[in-house]
Image (tube, grey):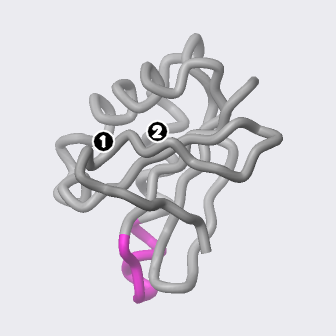
Amino acid sequence: MEFILVLQWPATSEADYDVLISLEEHLESDLNEAHGFVDGHDFGAGEMNLFVHTDQPLDAFRDAQEVLGADPRWATVRAAYRSVDGDDYTVIWPVTLQKFSVS
């Protein structure tokens, strides 16, 4: 896989962590295999992240939107991808987002 897609939400509480695990399990079970696979999460520094390894980051994002879009948290998602060997992110969502990082 050439890229890592990151789905990121604001998070601060234990309840947020429980939501992250639920989102991860849901995405793992329903992500189109042709578009990648979920490769874990992290939580801290006011954010929670899901990582998807993929060769097709835009298709993987659309799949994630289909799978998780009904969850109220989707409204606050930020998404970007980078090459597996790179450090610079390309923002996918929201389109107005200028900078993206994983703390």
**Front-lying residue, 1 or 27:** 1
Which is more N-terminal, label 2 or label 1? Answer: 2
- Residue found at the very far top of the displayed protein: 34
Name the side, left or right, on which 56 lies relative to 87. left
Q: What span is colored magenta in the figure? A: 10-19
Crowding at dot 2, Cα within 10 Å, few <14 / some 14-19 / many 20+, comes out as many
- Secondary structure of the residue carrying tag 1 is helix
- Percent x, y of residue 64: 38, 34
| Residue 3 on the magenta segment | no
Q: In this rendering, would 96 be left or right of 29? A: left
Residue 36 point in image, percent of width and height: 61, 24
Q: Is residue 8 above or below residue 82?
A: below
| Residue 95 sits in quarter | top left
Q: Position of residue 32 (x, y in %)?
A: 49, 18
**What separation in Å lies between label 1 and label 2 (alpha carbons)?**
7 Å
Q: Which mark is residue 27?
A: 2
Q: Residue furthest front?
A: 98
Kindly report the secondary structure that dominates the magenta region of the rendered protein: helix
Residue 85 image point, x, y percent: 82, 41
Kindly indicate whether the residue at mark 2 contacts the one at mark 1 (C-beta within 8 angstroms): yes
87 over 47 or under it: above or below: above
The residue under label 1 is: 68
In the picture provided, is 70 more to the left or to the right than 20?
A: left
For badge 2, the amino acid type reads Leu
Q: How many numbered dots are placed on residues in this image? A: 2
